[in-house]
Image: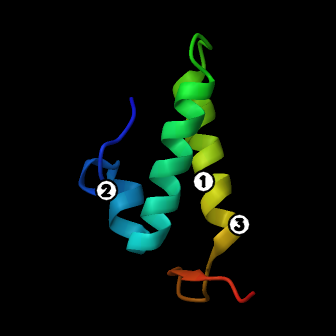
C-alpha cells in the first residue's frame, strides 16, 4: 500500500532512517508499488526498490546509524 507521509511508514523505516532518507524510501516505494501493479509480489518488489534507493544516498556508519554518503 502506498504511504501518504513519513508517519505512516513501517517502524524499521520510520525509526531508523533520517527524515530525508525516509522521504527517499517513501517516494521510491510509492513509485515502485504503482509500477508493479498486478504483480503478485508487488509489495515485496516495492520494499526492495525503496531500500535500494536509500542505499544509493545513505550508508550505515560504524555505529549502525544511517548517514548521507559523501559525494
**Which of the pair 4/69 is nearer the observer?**
4
**Which of the pair 68/31 is nearer the observer?**
31
Label annotation for residue 22: none
Q: Which residue is mark 1?
A: 51
Going from the N terminus, do you reach mark 2 or mark 1 first? 2
Q: CA distance from mark 3 to mark 2?
A: 19 Å
**Which of the pair 25/15 is nearer the observer?**
25
Locate residue 13, reporting x and y percent: 41, 58
Exactly how many numbered labels are in the figure?
3
Q: CA distance from mark 2 to mark 1?
A: 15 Å
Q: CA distance from mark 3 to mark 1?
A: 9 Å
Q: Quadrant of residue 47?
A: top right
Q: Which residue is mark 3?
A: 56
Q: Residue at x 39, y 29 (%)?
A: 1
Left or right? Give the position of 8 relative to 27: left
Locate residue 37, reporting x and y percent: 57, 17
What is the crowding at mark 3: few (fewer than 14 residues within 10 Å), some, or many (at least 20)? few
Q: Residue at x 63, y 32 (%)?
A: 45
Q: Is residue 22 above or below residue 32?
A: below
The residue most toward the left is 7
Amino acid at each position: 500500500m502506498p504511504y501518504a507521509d513519513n508517519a505512516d511508514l513501517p517502524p524499521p523505516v520510520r525509526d531508523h532512517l533520517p527524515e530525508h532518507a525516509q522521504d527517499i524510501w517513501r517516494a521510491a516505494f510509492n513509485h515502485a508499488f504503482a509500477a508493479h501493479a498486478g504483480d503478485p509480489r508487488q509489495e515485496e518488489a516495492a520494499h526492495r526498490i525503496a531500500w535500494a534507493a536509500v542505499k544509493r544516498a545513505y550508508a550505515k556508519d560504524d555505529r549502525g546509524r544511517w548517514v548521507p554518503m559523501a559525494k
